């Protein structure tokens, strides 16, 4: 063997290639990547820490006396609704993260790897459920200090948060679909706000729909955010019915069945 061959052998890898990562392993790896982004850029947690506190304090003390006669009574009605509104709103950041990866070229690198392809998106979405749980914990903790007393007890609160996180996970697939279609992060934010703004504000988050005009009440009652708020509010106060929870589960299944396969189709076909 010549000197050149020996030098080539030294620089070339002679060990066996590592085994292909399993679907679970690659999913956890991409979930860990999303977590590291939060670790090194903690300002990204502003939307799940500072904003929920501002919303709860502002809406409770600004509108509580005018709408319910006292801030204490209004807090019992408002907190489950504003919790749902806050968590649903931050789901749009999932699509923005994906769109950002595409614009930077990281998306193409991931698609070239020998991994289970959905793990890139599933890992990111699973990490986002931790963000939803953090936001929920902060808001409920603050609400308890302000005087919120859930009639459903700890079990009711845990079930309400679990339902909210499951719905938000399903809704996130809508934003990943749009993240693959729309060309810029700003356009995605514009579209998501155009969808979320009327759905969250024209709902039963802030007021009882019975106080609204009949034509508006009809829209509010079929609004999926209203269905979610009704179920979360009912679970927290121990008054939820099977039908109220069932409508939310049906809505999240429909979102998942439509947008998860559509996202993966666009993910494979995107050039």
Image (cartoon, helix red, strand yellow):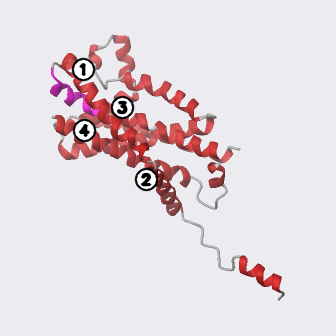
Query: Could you tell me which secondary element the residue under label 2 belongs to?
Result: helix
Q: Which residue is mark 3?
A: 85
The disc, 4 or 2, on the residue closer to the chain's N-terminal end is 2
In magenta segment, residue 128: no
**Residue 110 percent across, percent down from the top left:** 62, 54
Q: Is residue 142 left or right of residue 246?
A: left
Task: Specify the quadrant of the image occupied by residue 77.
Answer: top left
Q: Which residue is mark 4?
A: 235
Looking at the picture, tell me which residue is in the foreground, 44 or 270: 44
Query: Could you tell me which secondary element the residue under label 4 belongs to?
Result: helix
The correct choice, above or below, for 90 with respect to 71 in the image is below
Q: Which residue is mark 2?
A: 39
Between marks 4 and 2, how big is the CA–CA gap? 33 Å
Q: Which residues are magenta?
A: 70-81
In the rendered structure, are the residues bearing label 2 and label 1 in contact, judged by CB atoms less than 8 Å apart? no
Where, quadrant-wise, is the C terminus in this rendering? top right
The disc, 4 or 3, on the residue closer to the chain's N-terminal end is 3
């Amino acid at each position: 063997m010549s000197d050149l061959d020996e030098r080539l052998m030294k620089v070339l890898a002679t060990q066996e290639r590592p085994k292909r990562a399993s679907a679970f392993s690659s999913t956890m790896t991409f979930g860990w990547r999303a977590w590291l982004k939060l670790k090194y850029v903690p300002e990204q947690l502003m939307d799940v820490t500072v904003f929920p506190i501002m919303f709860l304090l502002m809406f409770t003390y600004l509108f509580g006396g005018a709408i319910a006669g006292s801030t204490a009574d209004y807090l019992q009605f408002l907190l489950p609704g504003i919790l749902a509104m806050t968590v649903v709103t931050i789901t749009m950041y999932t699509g923005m993260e994906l769109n950002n990866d595409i614009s930077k070229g990281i998306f193409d690198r991931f698609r070239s790897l020998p991994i289970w392809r959905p793990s890139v998106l599933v890992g990111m979405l699973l990490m986002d459920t931790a963000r939803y749980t953090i936001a929920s914990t902060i808001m409920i903790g603050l609400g308890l200090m302000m005087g919120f007393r859930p009639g459903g007890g700890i079990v009711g609160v845990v079930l309400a948060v679990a339902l909210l996180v499951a719905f938000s996970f399903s809704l996130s697939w809508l934003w990943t679909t749009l993240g693959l279609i729309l060309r810029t992060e700003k356009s995605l934010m514009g579209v998501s706000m155009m969808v979320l703004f009327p759905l969250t504000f024209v709902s039963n988050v802030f007021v009882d729909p019975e106080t609204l005009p009949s034509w508006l009440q009809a829209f509010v009652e079929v609004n999926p955010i209203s269905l979610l708020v009704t179920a979360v509010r009912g679970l927290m106060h121990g008054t939820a019915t099977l039908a109220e929870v069932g409508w939310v589960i049906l809505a999240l299944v429909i979102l998942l069945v439509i947008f998860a396969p559509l996202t993966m189709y666009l993910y494979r076909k995107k050039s």
